[in-house]
């Protein structure tokens, strides 16, 4: 089986590199291989390409100045750079008076991991719960953002169930307490209008491979005036992030951001796919839809099925040439329920029988129809097998 034979419906895990993006990258994988830190012509060609890409990413994110964009290796690094960098900087500047980190119970593992690492090193951590639809209570959360908070990090949209968080309200609460606000926008980029200034974010993360750019490149929006302690030391990116820039990847990210900004209406087509999918899937007995009914990403749907294991369902559909997931790709194969569904209070039997379907560039109605044709039989077969054990 080749990729052309597949119905790829896991765009929240990763996306294919678009032909236009690859074409923009190719010169910097061939003859234009200069180091952007070098002063001679070959290096300055690379520098020019990096700065042009920076301007494209800045425009896509609504930044006031291209220099508010720092290039990283991925969304996870951007998250760590924002949270750890802000926390360490606060320790330096506030003499230890700002030791609190506030986050939500449904964050990506990159955020959860760095917050836990800071906790082990003395940070006070406040975790915001969510309701049964995966939504943070903004009013209750605001009361937990105190004057000793250094950084608050709440994702823009959840990577599993797609629920969109009230980040504007949370950012405003942070400003009133002098805390920095970071949002992980890795999943919302390219799917929702994204304007860092309107959201009120001080720091905002994106990842290239979620918006049809290559893996291995990401970006962090750092509002002008915000200072971060370095997590990777070095002089690149105006002394904010060390390491020779991934020129080809950065160029690809810039091209992908430009395409995503130009094709904002694409979300309507994805929402139509989602509507037909949900209508068909919810006819299957013992199925339910997870996440907020309206405040969610237009490109994905998350289901639970009684009486089966989600991982086994993913394998069964893979045999039919259909790519979907039972949760985030970074924890695929795990037999325990997703921490997101646990935080939402889902019954464990339903939480382990979950399925995430996500659309993007290249998705067609035929792909959706193929899944709807295969899914009822796969669910019935797995339930029969499970009942026989």
Image (spheres, helix red, strand yellow):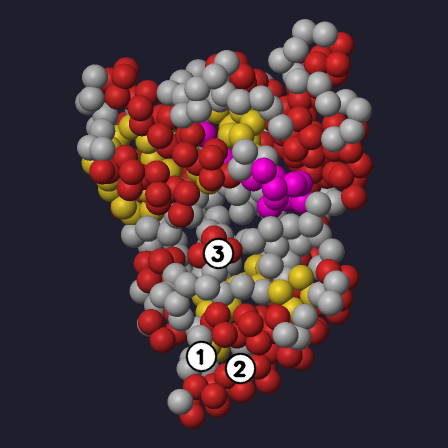
Q: Which mark is residue 375?
A: none
The image quadrant that residue 142 belongs to is: top left
Could you tell me if residue 256 is visible in this image? Answer: yes
Q: Nearer the viewer, residue 134 or 244?
A: 244
CA separation in Å, label 2 and label 1: 8 Å
Label 2 neighbourhood size at 10 Å, few (<14), some (14-19), many (20+)? many
Marks 2 and 1: CB-CB under 8 Å?
yes
> Quick check: 172 left or right of 145?
right
| Distance in Å between CA atoms under marks 1 and 3 | 18 Å
Residue bearing the label numbered 2: 379
Magenta-drawn segment: 203-216
Quadrant occupied by the N terminus: bottom right
Quadrant where the C terminus lies?
bottom left
Q: Nearer the viewer, residue 86 or 248?
A: 248
Pointer 1 with pointer 3, Cβ within 8 A? no
* 318 over 292 or under it: above or below: below
Residue 67 position, x and y percent, is: 57, 18
- Residue 290: x percent and y percent? 45, 66
Secondary element at image label 2 = helix
Q: Nearer the viewer, residue 62 or 287?
A: 287
Residue at 69% from the left image edge and 34% from the top image edge: 252
Specify which label sits upstream in the sequence, 2 or 3: 3
State the mark number for residue 328.
Answer: 3
| Residue furthest top in the image | 39
Residue count near mark 3 (Cα–Cα under 10 Å), binned few <14, some 14–19, many ≥20: some
Q: Which numbered marker is on residue 308? A: 1
């Amino acid at each position: 089986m080749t990729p052309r034979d597949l119905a790829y419906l896991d765009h929240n895990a990763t996306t294919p590199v678009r032909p236009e993006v690859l074409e923009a990258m190719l010169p910097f994988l061939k003859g234009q291989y200069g180091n952007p830190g070098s002063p001679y012509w070959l290096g300055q060609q690379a520098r020019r390409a990096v700065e042009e890409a920076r301007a494209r990413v800045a425009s896509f994110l609504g930044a006031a100045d291209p220099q508010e964009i720092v290039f990283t290796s991925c969304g996870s690094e951007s998250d760590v750079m924002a949270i750890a960098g802000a926390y360490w900087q606060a320790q330096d500047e506030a003499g230890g008076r700002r030791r609190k980190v506030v986050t939500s119970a449904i964050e990506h593992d990159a955020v959860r991991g760095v917050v836990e690492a800071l906790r082990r090193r003395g940070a006070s951590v406040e975790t915001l719960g969510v309701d049964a639809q995966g939504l943070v209570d903004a009013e209750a959360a605001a009361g937990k953002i105190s004057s000793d908070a250094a950084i608050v990090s709440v994702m823009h949209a959840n990577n599993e169930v797609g629920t969109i968080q009230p980040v504007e309200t949370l950012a405003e609460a942070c400003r009133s307490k002098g805390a920095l606000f970071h949002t992980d926008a890795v999943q919302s980029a390219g799917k929702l209008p994204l304007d860092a200034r309107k959201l009120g974010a001080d720091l905002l993360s994106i990842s290239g491979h979620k918006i049809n750019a290559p893996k291995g490149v990401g970006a962090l929006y750092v509002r002008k005036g915000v200072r971060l302690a370095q997590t990777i030391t070095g002089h690149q990116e105006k002394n904010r992030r060390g390491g020779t820039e991934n020129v080809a990847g950065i160029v690809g990210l810039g091209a992908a951001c430009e395409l995503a900004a130009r094709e904002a209406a694409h979300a309507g087509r994805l929402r139509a796919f989602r509507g037909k999918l949900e209508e068909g899937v919810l006819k299957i007995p013992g199925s339910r839809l997870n996440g907020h009914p309206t405040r969610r990403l237009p490109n994905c749907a998350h289901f639970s099925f009684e009486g089966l294991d989600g991982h086994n369902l993913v394998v069964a559909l893979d045999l039919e040439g259909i790519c979907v997931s039972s949760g985030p790709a970074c924890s695929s194969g795990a037999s325990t329920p997703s921490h997101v569904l646990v935080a939402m209070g889902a019954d464990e039997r339903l939480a382990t029988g979950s399925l995430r379907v996500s659309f993007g560039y290249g998705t067609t109605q035929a792909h959706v129809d193929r899944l709807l044709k295969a899914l009822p039989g796969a669910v019935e077969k797995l339930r029969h097998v499970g009942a026989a054990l």
